[in-house]
Amino acid sequence: MRRWLVMFLAVLLPATACASEGGVDQGETRTVQHALGETEIPVDPERVVTLWASTLSATIALDEEPVGYAFNDEPTEGIDVPEGYDVGQLDYLGDSQELDLERIAGANPDLILATDLHEDAYDQLSEIAPTVALEWSGSGAWKEHLTDVAEVLNAEDKADEVVDDYNERVAEVADAIGDPGGIEVSVVRFHAEELRLEVRNSFTGRIVDDVGLARPEVQDVEEEGSGYLPISLERLPDADGDAMFAFTIADSDTEQPDLLKQARGNPLWEDLDVVSDDEVYPVDYTTWISTNYIGAHAVLDDLEEALG
């Protein structure tokens, strides 16, 4: 159990004594320590609201049903939520980085799952309903995040199933590749104004590591917080490897410049071994930045298809 998220011995209180300021009857409660303090939460919350994309994905992966969510964009089936999941049954509560407190309150939650990135709004959220702020240290935190959500929702057994399914799939992909340690995989995000080399502690970096694939020396590092190394087109040689998985923000935002297209027109591009060997694999931007177990399976599918 993580240092800052410790479940105390449950303190069971009569239902009549545990109504939140928002008027939702909490029933029996327990106390949870989290990134921004400690909070008394319902033992069996029935109206959970999530305020971070990975939190929504984790909650649904744990077979829990939130009543509402904040999200920067529309959740994508097969990436943020399972295929066939009806996101429309949930209340959309606005952007996760510019919280709409009125809409959140309107969902009448009995538990709000926020992150430490919402510190400025924490007191206001706590006035609406009991709020747990989960630590979010960057895109590489997706595994721990599921575990943290499971601890809050008493869903540890289901979390074990999710992790076991992922580990089994990792083993299948590694077997399909044969000798993953003999392949240096470069993971490059072609963002709006820069290339971002996804290093070991990024979302995709951790998946690549799990499969046992090697990384080019410049990417075989960790970058605290960001999980990537920003480079310019002039440093394209740093993106070389035995295979490159390339994804561009222009796939999901057509108003952004397509740096992958620009890179292909750069003389340095043709000098890359990965280009001359025809081992560049364009992949879906939204999938490869999804930071959850659902998206991780889609990344594993891409790795197997390209290298297996």
Image (tube, grey):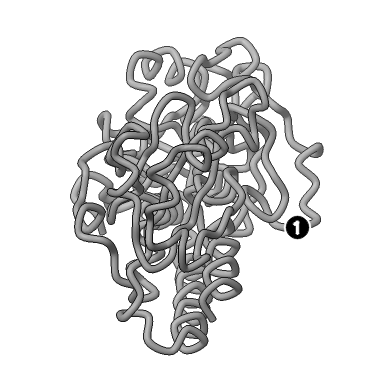
Q: Position of residue 51 (x, y in %)?
A: 52, 30
Image quarter hosting the N terminus = bottom left
Q: Amino acid at mark 1?
A: Glu
Residue highlighted by disc 1: 83
Which of the pair 262/47 is nearer the observer?
262
Question: Above or below — where is 11 with respect to 275?
Answer: above
On screen, residue 177 above or below 147 = below
Quadrant showing the C terminus: bottom right
Vertical comparison of 41 with 108: above or below: below
**92 horizontally vs 256: left or right:** right
Residue positioned 69% across, 33% down in the render: 74
**Residue name at image x 62 percent, y 32 percent:** 69
Left or right for 92, reference 2: right
Q: Nearer the viewer, residue 66 or 30?
A: 66
Whole-percent x, y for residue 8 in the image: 27, 50
Residue 103: image quadrant is: top right
Q: Is residue 249 above or below residue 119?
A: below
Q: Nearer the viewer, residue 234 or 14?
A: 234
SS label for mark 1: loop
Residue 28 seen in this snapshot: yes
Q: Quadrant of residue 242?
A: bottom left
Percent from the top left, x then y, of residue 112?
Answer: 50, 31
- Residue 150, position in %: x, y? 45, 56
Question: How many numbered tags mark residues here?
Answer: 1
Q: Quadrant of residue 274?
A: bottom left
* Residue at 44 percent of width and 82 percent of height: 174
Q: Is residue 137 visible?
A: no
> 234 left or right of 142?
left
Would you call the spot at circle 1 few (<14 residues within 10 Å), some (14-19), or many (20 or more)? Answer: few
